[in-house]
Amino acid sequence: MNWMNRFIATTLPAVPKPIVRFFSKRYIAGNTVSDAVRVVQDLAGQGCIATVDVLGEFIKNLKEADRTVNEYLKILQRLEQEKLECNISIKLTQFGLLIDQEKCYENVRKIVESVHEKNNFVRIDMEDSACTSDTIALFSRFAQEYPENVGIVIQSYLRRSMNDITTMLEEIKNLNVRICKGIYIEPREIAYKDPAIINYNYMALLEKLFSGGAYVGIATHDEKLVFHAQELIRKMNIPRNRYEFQMLLGVDQELRRSIVANGHRLRVYVPFGQKWYAYSLRRLKENPQIAGYVLRGILQQ
Ligand SMILES: Cc1cc2nc3c(=O)[nH]c(=O)nc-3n(C[C@H](O)[C@H](O)[C@H](O)COP(=O)(O)OP(=O)(O)OC[C@H]3O[C@@H](n4cnc5c(N)ncnc54)[C@H](O)[C@@H]3O)c2cc1C
């Protein structure tokens, strides 16, 4: 499938935009706040909770960050009005992490304050390895002040992750971590490449976080990991209010239904926004494996 993935990824920009939109529809809620709210309501009807993400990353000027802050404030307001069990996920490069870290902090602070006021929660997504240390540093600043309202993501493909969570468990009260494998292409010096090791590390991180008393978002569509995580929850007797499973919108709904049927909380990651096209192409070019997923999705429709 590798050459096929690469082929689709490179030829996709030539495909007319409405066609790309048609096929990316199942992964992206739409352009507007109302589109995202409609999808979250629909998921609630299926017994799922959600997190929404305003699409965009790696901005070029800080004006773009202001627009993103406003978009997040708007959706937080709507989620509160509609009384939906839905939090938000943000990427720090959308707020200027790579341009001006203090400005980024100030931008994110506006969101964190609104989240705190509304008794909601913001998850700081993890981006590529150039952002890891700064993301953890900024998260730690917020987590000291608002431990109940802010969480972070750790990637099991990074060799550093076990050290990172060890330090976080020592320094942060009520630590809240999403574990994922990691989506970016990273060099071997810093990232495991063997899928078996990435999975082994995933489970080691999960066990460490459970033992340390953290709340964990178990983000994966890998059924083996879901199976082992459920086993660990049972063996360690972890109560339902200490973890949740998480999946991306449009991916493996059968697995999603089976997790919900087993009585676990399941949060769906719902991306939306004007930048869906640039985002889809960028992601496909960065990681041609996703193009393969899209193709399989198309064939299954
Ligand atoms: C809720 C959530 C939040 C995430 N947040 C981050 C983050 O902050 N930083 C980060 O680096 N990564 C993030 N990721 C992405 C993650 O790191 C993985 O790249 C992605 O989830 C694929 O890994 P997997 O665990 O599903 O296992 P895989 O072994 O890659 O996938 C298992 C199976 O799931 C299906 N699948 C997986 N991904 C997709 C997809 N996109 N489309 C269609 N089918 C798919 C495939 O059928 C595949 O065979 C997140 C993932 C989820 C679910």
Image: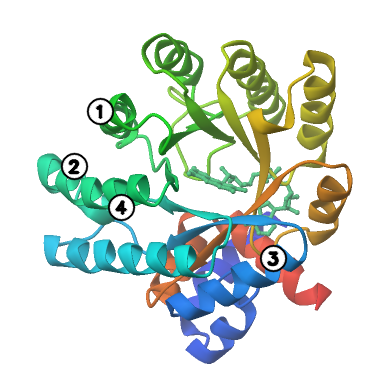
Q: CA gap, disc 3 to disc 1?
A: 33 Å
Residue 141 appears left or right of 146: left
**Amino acid on which disc 1 is placed:** Arg
**Label 1 element class:** helix
Circles 3 and 2 in contact, beta carbons < 8 Å: no
Residue holding disc 3: 43
Q: CA gap, disc 1 to disc 2?
A: 9 Å
Q: Residue at x 53, y 70 (%)?
A: 82
Q: Can residue 16 be seen?
A: no
**Amino acid on which disc 4 is placed:** Ser
Residue 226 appears left or right of 192: right
What label sits on residue 114 in the rendered view?
Answer: 4
Residue holding disc 1: 141
**Label 2 element class:** helix
Residue holding disc 2: 105
Circles 1 and 2 in contact, beta carbons < 8 Å: yes
Question: Whole-percent x and y of residue 19?
Answer: 58, 88
